[in-house]
Image: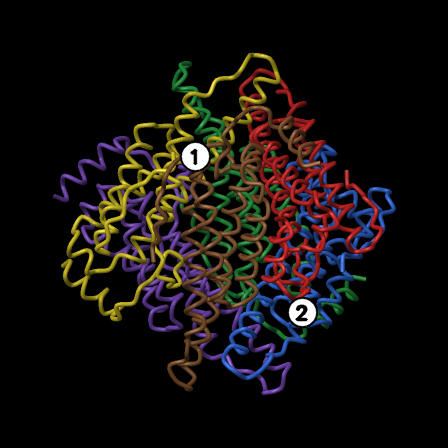
Chain colours: A green, B blue, C red, D brown, E yellow, F purple
């Protein structure tokens, strides 16, 4: 069954064309984009958990609510960007030939995308940490398909 | 192997929570959103193929270039929206329990997403028509998982 | 007076050209887009009203604030999309000829757009329900102008 | 009939609340936003009409196509922003009490919004000039409702 | 050193081309865009400080949270737009020749941009007021470079 | 003079707070984001220069125009993202203390931002290459301020 679908998709995209992160195809894909935003998701999640109002007066509570509200919105935005960058790799970079070599490819990306959603819906350091691991796994697979040994360097 | 991953994902999302098209979860998913934009992709593709300048004078050529440029940009935008709406269903609505029932689920969505990209990269009535068919297939699966019989009604 | 304006507008847009939801004109208009987002507005409004923290501990309160903040943001986004989709119909699909047949057209759309804003500003199940009714009314008028009998099918 | 609808809308929005350009309500409305973008639409339209390739060589043609493509895209974007800014005034600032004083209000905004679409679809200096006039008319009505005498100052 | 860089930049942009707010270049720059959004930032900041729940019942608290959450999001959005509009002037309108006349130009814009960020991070009427002053200063410099005497007119 | 302004800005931002790429502050800044998009700008610029229609028939010309139009739009989008990512570093990450150490800081960022605009306005491999060099320079300064030795790794 899988072979039939693979064949169908290959028929659909016969040329070994290189599509890119911008759908160009510009040929420039880099999991670092998803890594940066996933780091932000983890950072914001930790900051939300740790956030405390400086006092119980009106000004402190307003400042607390402003910061909390912004952190949640930024976590949302960064998780969404992570999801988009991951899915661009899945839909545009990875080809049937990669699927043969990595038969779990679909599930790896499905799980990673679902982790992005979980990081929005929850305030979970555990899931945000798992998201970082999922992005690192994708980083590994991606560069392996290019026969390049690119280090996993975090900004934070 | 697949079972192991499925189990892992289920462990990650134990509750039978309902996520929705807006990542809310608001519980409102509807493949009609992807259907409307896919119709626009097909419509714009046909119009691009048929477009002719009204004459060879400067005004006609400027009008032609304006229209052609806009059609291409709209095709791009609508194909991108179709891709996003399809992927929201895949990443947020569909759960491991659905994957068991539809083992081709990942490949169906992968192919549909790749068709969206193909409709951007090319001016292909054939691929735009296949995209409509892919969205109709997703419409069928989606409503079947909800035990509802919803008609496939096109706007155009 | 109205006739004078109608004439002026007709002079401005003499050709019976079909503009579409994407401003293309791709010819693909469908009030279903506004219906889906209006359903989300109503769903989120109800969920906001019903939302309770699971407990008074820090983790429960953080989870509550995360969810509340996201629901409000999603309600905002979906109400904005509803407004945009409604206004595209009003500004691009409907023509002077329709205004003659539906002399209340402007007020119907004005009221619907104002309901979208009200659903942002307030947390009102009543106004969100009225918005659904307004979108259904627009659905009815729209398909009547196309001499098509399209069912009002909700996703939720 | 009109009175009945007006009454219904008034019932819907009983308080004399001030909604604003950002849907806040922040109370800050200013037709200058629509004026700036409408100026850009007119400017880009003129530049598109006047644009000529510097030569027939490949580099000149590529430069010409790059510029033409960008001008069309910017015209589109600025016309869309003009439309959005105009419609915010119509849907959020103007109230039934203003409609009584300006019974043509709906048609003025409808025509202005349709001009925005026309400026996208066409490369028409005439329609872009009419759009500027429409925005100036709205500027006049707007400040009159605030009993302020604000000058119409253009940037270009 | 500064002269060397200035020379390098001038070499990079030899022609006295007029770039504009839309990067077109459409030639239409106007600090009024930044002024409108900065007014909104100040307005929302004041409203956030003044906001009180109407009561302690569930409905009042939900309404309060909805309004607070929206005000913070709008303040964020408007501060971001102010920042973008200010930076377009700095990166696209101002040229080395202006820098010679206004040697503090870079610091003026840096400070103004940092004030936009401060208005997001904090709920500070003081910083929002300083932002308005910074935009007025930019308004003054901008019109001076065009030898035009344009009044500073606020909408609120 | 510079010292006075620096002092004023320092007074404005007394705390050594860490703002981040997402304006959070999430503390996650990484010039890799600007590097990825700058690579795409260079890639698209080269592809635009090299693009040729496959033939003179209608289908070939339509395919050529579709590709050319998309490449120009992607170049625009990626140059805009590069500009935004560069400016976030300048406005949010860099502080007066860095300016003391790098007195050319403002001019470096001004030039880099102007290069982004030049890469939109023109189809220039030379300027796109200079943009890559400017981003690499910023990469060097950025990591030096963090006392980290991070390699400059390109994706393409």
Quick check: C142 above or below F136? above
What label does residue B1 carry, if any?
A: none
Local crowd at mark 2 within 10 Å, few (<14), some, or many (≥20)? many
Front of the two marks 1 and 2: 1
Local crowd at mark 1 within 10 Å, few (<14), some, or many (≥20)? few
Whether residue E65 is visible, yes or no, is yes
Instruction: Report whether E117 appears left or right of C25.
Output: left
Gap between marks 1 and 2 measured at Cα: 48 Å
State the image coordinates of residue A133 (x, y, percent, origin top left): 55, 45
State the image coordinates of residue B139 (x, y, percent, origin top left): 79, 52
Quick check: A110 above or below E19? above
Instruction: Report whether B110 appears left or right of D97.
Output: right
State the image coordinates of residue D51 (x, y, percent, origin top left): 42, 75
State the image coordinates of residue D35 (x, y, percent, origin top left): 42, 51
> Can you identify the residue that label 1 sits on?
D146
| SS state under label 2 | helix
For the N terminus of chain D, the quadrant is top right
Image quadrant in which you'd find residue F16: top left
Q: Residue at x 37, y 48 (%)?
A: D152
Quick check: A45 above or below C55? below
Residue lying furthest top: E56
Q: Which of the chains bears the disc numbered 1?
A: D
Image quadrant in which you'd find residue B147: top right
Whether residue A94 is visible, yes or no, is no
> Can you identify the residue that label 2 sits on?
B45
């Amino acid at each position: 069954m899988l072979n039939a679908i693979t064949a169908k998709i290959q028929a659909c995209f016969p040329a070994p064309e290189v599509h890119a992160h911008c759908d160009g195809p510009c040929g420039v894909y880099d999991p670092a984009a998803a890594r940066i935003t996933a780091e932000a998701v983890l950072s914001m999640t930790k900051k939300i958990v740790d956030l405390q109002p400086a006092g119980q007066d009106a000004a402190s509570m307003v400042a607390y609510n402003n910061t909390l509200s912004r952190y949640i919105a930024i976590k949302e935005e960064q998780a969404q960007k992570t999801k988009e960058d991951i899915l661009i790799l899945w839909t545009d970079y990875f080809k049937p030939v990669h699927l043969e070599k990595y038969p779990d490819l679909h599930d790896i990306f499905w799980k990673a995308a679902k982790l992005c959603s979980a990081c929005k819906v929850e305030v979970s350091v555990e899931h945000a940490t798992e998201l970082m691991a999922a992005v690192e796994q994708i980083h590994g697979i991606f560069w392996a398909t290019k026969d390049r040994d690119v280090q996993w360097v975090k900004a934070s």
